[in-house]
Image (spheres, rainbow, N blue to C red):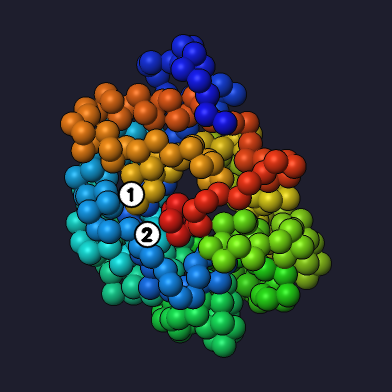
């Protein structure tokens, strides 16, 4: 449900981006493309993908305007996403433009296939860190899940990113029951051996094929129980950034794991995120289909103040939670690659 006009009468016109539940929004997920060079089974169909025409995708200038306005409203952290952001031509130049705005944290999520060759350029342009998606440490299973690409390339890219100073390299693992959940201890051992934090992400209803079912979700609490039965864990004190992952370190000091429990234990009450899709749709929740168009405002001659009002309205109209467990929950019309992670 979209709030009616009267809903916004009490909306603040100054200060940070705050919603009606007191959540202050300081994190912007900026998707730079809906294109991807992989076809991960939990995200995209294997064949028949239809991408947006290039003229519908936000230009570098438009993306920079959105980032600049967000910074003026208190956003301190920006993450570039996709699709696969590193397939966007000129991505290093775009990152440099965003970095010049002066965010406290500038990160990027990638599937790792292009990261090895771009790591030094990205670091030089001002990128602070990367999250690399890697859902299996077994080459054949990696190929089964990703449908394209090679595990070795992604692992080498992690090394290259660390060598370029993009630290920490965090590893994102989407767990699906019966597919790769038998690798939980393997990934925990990987974290212990490399020092790279591993984030286990619950499977969400954002796949393009519509195959998501609740029984395929591997609960974060079960992941932690498996790991702690082998290597004791202790919680890492929560920081001030409202990160979605619950973090745990090994008590012997060798590595860290985390769980993102979007389905079984949502973190909606502390959510501080806004998302801009590659075609300029503004989403106040990953699972919301309310999508006012920043692109249309900018291409219609709108000012920075017009964009600022859009951001404020989006935040002010945010619901208390995503409602996956509500009887009337409807999965989003767009899949993850079209929204931006």
Residue 42: percent from left, percent from top: 57, 67
Q: CA distance from mark 1 to mark 2?
A: 8 Å
Residue identifier under label 2: 34
Residue 193 position (above or below residue 232)? below
Residue to which mark 1 is pinned: 279
Say above or below: 10 vs 139: above
* Closest to the observer, 92 or 275: 275
Residues at badges 1 and 2 in contact (C-beta under 8 Å)? yes
Q: Quadrant of the N terminus?
A: top right
Which residue is depicted at the point 28% across and 38% down?
296
Q: How many marks?
A: 2
User: Residue 289, how many percent across, how many down?
Assistant: 51, 42
Q: Quick one: SS at disc 2?
A: loop
Q: Determine the secondary structure under disc 1.
A: loop
Residue 129 visible within the image: no
Instruction: Name the residue rendered at 66%, 62% in the picture.
Output: 212
Q: Residue at x 38, y 15 (%)?
A: 13
**227 lies left or right of 153:** right
């Amino acid at each position: 449900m979209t709030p009616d006009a009267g809903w916004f009468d009490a909306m603040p016109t100054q200060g940070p981006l705050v919603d009606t539940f007191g959540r202050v929004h300081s994190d912007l997920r900026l998707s730079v493309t809906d294109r991807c060079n992989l076809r991960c089974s939990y995200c995209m169909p294997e064949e028949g993908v239809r991408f947006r025409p290039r003229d519908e995708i936000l230009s570098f200038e438009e993306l920079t305007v959105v980032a600049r306005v967000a910074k003026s409203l208190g956003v301190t952290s920006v993450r570039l996403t996709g699709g696969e952001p590193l397939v966007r031509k000129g991505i290093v130049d775009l990152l440099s433009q965003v970095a010049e705005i002066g965010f406290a944290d500038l990160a990027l999520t990638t599937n790792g296939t292009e990261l090895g060759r771009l790591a030094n350029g990205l670091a030089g342009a001002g990128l602070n860190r990367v999250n690399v998606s890697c859902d299996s440490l077994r080459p054949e299973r990696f190929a089964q899940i990703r449908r394209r690409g090679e595990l070795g390339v992604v692992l080498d890219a992690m090394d290259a990113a660390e060598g370029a100073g993009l630290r920490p390299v965090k590893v994102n693992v989407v767990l699906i029951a019966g597919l790769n959940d038998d690798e939980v201890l393997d990934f925990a051992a990987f974290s212990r051996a490399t020092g790279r934090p591993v984030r286990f992400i619950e499977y969400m209803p954002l796949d393009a094929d519509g195959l998501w079912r609740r029984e395929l979700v591997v609960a974060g609490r079960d992941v932690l129980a498996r790991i702690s039965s082998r290597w004791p864990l202790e919680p890492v004190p929560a920081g001030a950034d409202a990160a979605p992952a619950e973090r745990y370190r090994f008590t012997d000091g060798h590595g860290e794991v985390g769980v993102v429990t979007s389905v079984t234990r949502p973190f909606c009450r502390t959510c501080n995120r806004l998302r801009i899709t590659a075609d300029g749709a503004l989403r106040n929740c990953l699972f919301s289909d309310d999508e006012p168009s920043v692109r249309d405002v900018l291409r219609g001659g709108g000012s920075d103040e017009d964009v600022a009002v859009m951001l404020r309205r989006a935040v002010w109209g945010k619901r208390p939670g995503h409602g996956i467990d509500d009887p009337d929950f409807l999965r989003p019309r767009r899949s993850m690659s079209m929204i931006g992670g």
